[in-house]
Amino acid sequence: MKTIGLIGGMSWESTVTYYQVLNETIKNHLGGLHSAKCILYSVDFQEIEKYQASGHWEKSGKVLSEAALSLEKAGADFIILCTNTMHKIAPMIEEKISIPLLHIAEATGDELLLNHITKVGLLGTKYTMTQDFYKDKFLKKGIEVLIPTVEDMEIINSIIFQELCRGQIKENSKKEYLRIIHSLYTNGAQGIVLGCTEIGLLVHPKDTSVPLFDTTLIHAKKAAQASLT
């Protein structure tokens, strides 16, 4: 079994899900008392978020690149970055390490194609929804991306940072997300990508008939499977 290097803590709330899914997937594949071989480097999200908000992406890239290099030196065979937004600086990380980085948008795009999805709605932080670093991964696979209105993007982003990253799950916020999900579906989206690792803490497949693609679950399962090849 290969050793997975996780860069987590962004936020730690969703990193918990990564650890759980990795181990559940390995157990389901191998049975017995098997669990995932992994090394976690958990960063201080306050520092990373400060760099995001101020536009100093290169500073957050330096922090996460050093984390990735530490994981490689510790014996990781490949890296997963347990966040969607910070894949903006994935190229910076890849420049610093000699082991692969399993990209969350690549894994999600492959899952969308397996489900014959060619037009998808994207929810996430304002950076993920508005910038090209994430959407381009889908577009290169022939998947059209729809994003919410400017007003709805502000609602989504605020709930992520002010509630979900702080462990707060509110019913009114779920209703707002479901409203936005159904609006995108009405406008032609065949499914919705939960493109922030915390959104799956709030919205679940049982909450809606619209197909949901939780990037946290997809990424973690893909990493577990990669560790067995």
Image: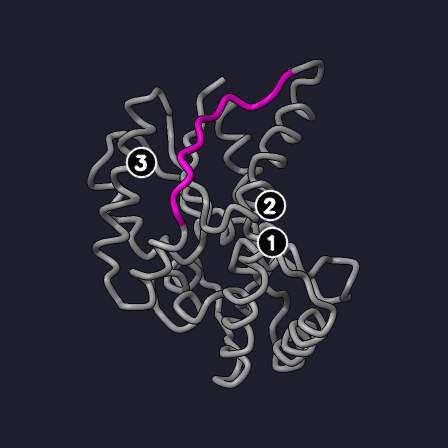
Identify the magenta region.
Answer: 34-44
The amino acid type of the residue labelled 3 equals Ala
Q: Residue at x 44, y 55 (%)?
A: 84
- Position of residue 162 relative to residue 185, above or below, is above
Q: Nearer the viewer, mark 1 or mark 3?
A: 3
> Which of 128/114 is in front?
128
Find numbered disc 3 in the image and state the secondary structure of the residue it sits on: helix
Task: Sort mark 2 into few (<14), some (14-19) or many (20+) by Cα contacts within 10 Å.
Answer: some
Q: Which label number is shown at residue 201?
A: none
Q: Residue at x 21, y 56 (%)?
A: 58
> Which image quarter: residue 176?
bottom right
- Position of residue 171 relative to residue 19, above or below, is below
Horizontal and vertical percent position of residue 14:
56, 48
Q: Is residue 191 left or right of residue 45?
A: right
> Which image quarter: residue 186?
bottom right
Q: Which label number is shown at residue 214?
A: 1
> Which image quarter: residue 172?
bottom right
The amino acid type of the residue labelled 1 equals Asp
Task: Sort mark 3 into few (<14), some (14-19) or many (20+) by Cα contacts within 10 Å.
Answer: many
- In this figure, which residue is indicated by the disc labeled 3? 68
Earlier sequence position, callout 1 versus callout 3: 3
Find numbered disc 2 in the image and state the secondary structure of the residue it sits on: helix
Contact (CB < 8 A) between labels 2 and 1? yes
Horizontal and vertical percent position of residue 114:
59, 50
- In this figure, which residue is indicated by the disc labeled 2? 217
Q: Is residue 222 left or right of residue 101?
A: right
Inter-mark Cα distance, 2 to 1: 6 Å
